[in-house]
Amino acid sequence: MSKIKPPKKTGQKKTPLQKVLITLIVIATTVIVAFVSIIAYGMIMNNEDPEPEVFIETQHPPQEPMPDPTPKPVDPLDPDPEETPAPDYKFFSPFTGLPMATEDMTRIRPIACALANTSDALPLNGVSHADIIYEVLVEGGLTRLLVLFQDYSRVEKIGCIRSARHYTAEIAEGYDALLATAGGSPQGIQQIRKSGQVHLNELGGKYRDVFFRDRNRIPNKRSESMHSVVTTNERLMKWLPTYDFSLFYEEDYEHVLTFVEDGTPQGGSGARDIEVNFSSGKRTSFIFDNDKNAYYMRQYNRDFVDANDNSRPLFTNILILKTAVSNISGDDSGRINLDTLGPGEGYFVCGGKYIPINWYRTDSASQFIYTLGDGSRLDLGIGKTYICFIPKNMDATFK
């Protein structure tokens, strides 16, 4: 059998020209592929994250803590034009008309502190933070202060705290305030027990922890010094929540004071310098400050200042209330009665002017009502108030 031979390959041979063209096509294809690869690599590299930079850590002093973001009340008497505009407050102090940060602040019961006001007790601590200050007569023709604080959380120190009188207890009761004293007259203690009001008493009782004796106020380091009793915001914030009484007003409690931005009485007479006579030996002066649109107080031939920071308190409103004052029969210490119910007459001072007013309240648990000559209610200017109770036979002078 013969072998089958594979068929022979057929086709034409490539010409030299064809060989050259094929070579050129191969070279061009190689160049194009290489170029496209380079472009693609560059695009990939540009889309990758860069290598992170290396920082050398250096030592820096510790930063100050961030400020409290809680908005603080803005005092219109001392605006700072460089500060950002105040937020749109919804709640305002029932004692000053000034804005407050939260509704809870408006519901806090105030503390009413009985403070000494003799020359040797000055300067007093905390008075620049007070919302309302009362000055009233005590025995011997001297005066004592009843100072109301609603926001006591910011008051570094309050003092020097002295004893209660029955009429200062009555004034505090009208605000449903926590009354802070170092004891009290027999009539004062009787009034406090009768009313059932909260009594923070340094000389006895179960609410003493808020007080201490300030060694800087004790001459010759005598612990029994009458001018050494003080309290602080730290002690008040620590101990008050532990006591068996509420720090807040009842839901149905309503305040009666009303405020307007400009309380200057229409048709009032000039009152840029005022002298209030409490007795033959005690007078208090007020000087109007044009820039602040408020009054500074002076007594004993010196400015009334706060011992905490040496600041001078400013008062937008001054109320001078005339009332019946008499000696307490049989009291060996010469203590007095002072009528806090009225009705009575007086003066309202604001914005460098004054007008006559009337005042009254129905009982010791009621708030003070102030009216104009036509019987309409008096609006106070937004700010703090100083109230002087003077005997009917005394008066004030205005310039």
Image (spheres, rainbow, N blue to C red):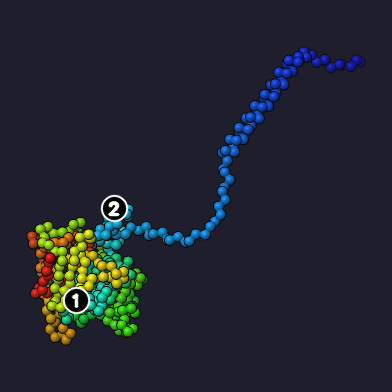
Observer able to see residue 162: no
Give residue 143's mark: 1
Query: Is residue 33 visible in this depiction of the protein?
Result: yes
Tell which circle, 2 or 1, labels the residue nearer the N-terminal end: 2
The answer to which quarter of the image holds residue 28 is top right
Q: Quarter of the image containing the C terminus?
A: bottom left
Q: Residue at x 15, y 78 (%)?
A: 281
Give the Cα distance between marks 2 and 1.
Answer: 41 Å
Q: Residue 161 in the image: x percent, y percent?
A: 27, 76
* Element marked by disc 1: strand
Report the residue at 14% width, 71% height from top: 276
- Residue depicted at 30% across the width and 76% down the height: 230
Circles 2 and 1: CB distance less than 8 Å? no
Q: Helix, strand or loop at disc 2?
A: loop
Q: Using the image, determine if residue 98 lies above or below residue 282.
A: above
Amino acid at pointer 2: Asp
Disc 2 crowd, CA 10 A, few/some/many (<14, 14-19, 20+): few
Q: Number of numbered discs present?
A: 2
Q: Is residue 234 left or right of residue 166?
A: right
Q: Few, some or many C-alpha atoms within 10 Å of disc 1 (few <14, some 14-19, many ≥20)?
A: many
Q: Amino acid at mark 1?
A: Thr
In the visual, does 166 lie left or right of 220? left
* Depth order, front residue of 246/62: 62
> Which residue is disc 2 drawn over?
88
Extreme front residue here? 301
Whole-percent x and y of residue 54?
57, 51
Q: Nearer the viewer, residue 8 or 315?
A: 315
The N terminus lies in which quarter of the figure? Answer: top right
35 or 1, which is in the foreground?
35
Q: Quadrant of residue 240?
A: bottom left
Left or right? Give the position of 370 relative to 13: left
Q: Position of residue 53 (x, y in %)?
A: 56, 48
